[in-house]
Amino acid sequence: MIEYVSYRKGEARLYFSSLEERNLFLRNMHGMEGVEGVEYKDNTRTLLIKFREGSFIHYILENLSGQRKSQALDRDDLHFYIQPFLKHPAVKLGVSMLLLGWKVGLVSFTFCSIFFMPYLKTRL
């Protein structure tokens, strides 16, 4: 699988799952129009490709980005799933500040636990 490490104007750094995959990509890319340079080390799975804007390799590298998909839970998701199970306000505040950061956790706790949830409980 190919993933972007970085993509800038005129160059892209790609990360490969294995060295064999990197070598296969390197062999097939050799001699392609628009490639100005390739940098890599023998025992790493990254590849830095310098290319000319508007070339065929630029088109290929630009369209690789559609394959990137994030499957992992991030801190916001974890906060969303844990919060309903916490009952004590101090624990809710601590978990919010731990997962979301000092400022965002405090604002989230203040808005949701003190203002929004009591309002919903009295109105519904």
Image: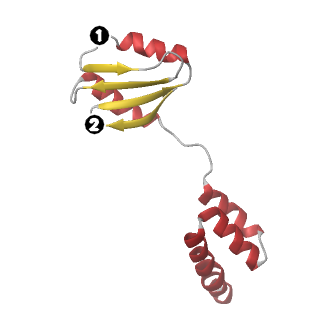
Q: Measured along the vertical axis of the image, is residue 102 above or below residue 8? A: below
User: Hey, what amino acid is under mark 2?
Assistant: Lys
Point 34% across, 11% down: residue: 30
Do the residues under discs 2 and 1 have CB atoms within 8 angstroms?
no
Question: Can you give x and y, in whole percent of width and height, for residue 20 in the image?
Answer: 53, 13
SS class of the residue under badge 1?
A: loop
Disc 1 marks which residue? Answer: 31
Question: Can you give x and y, in whole percent of width and height, for residue 93 in the image?
Answer: 69, 74
Residue extending farthest bottom: 122
Point 29% across, 28% down: residue: 59
Question: Can you give x and y, in whole percent of width and height, for residue 61 in the image?
Answer: 35, 29
- In the picture, residue 32 is in which quadrant? top left
Point 22% across, 30% down: residue: 53
Disc 2 marks which residue? Answer: 9
Question: Can you give x and y, in whole percent of width and height, for residue 27 in the image?
Answer: 40, 10
Q: How is the image coloured?
A: secondary structure
Of label 2 and label 1, which has the lower sequence position? 2
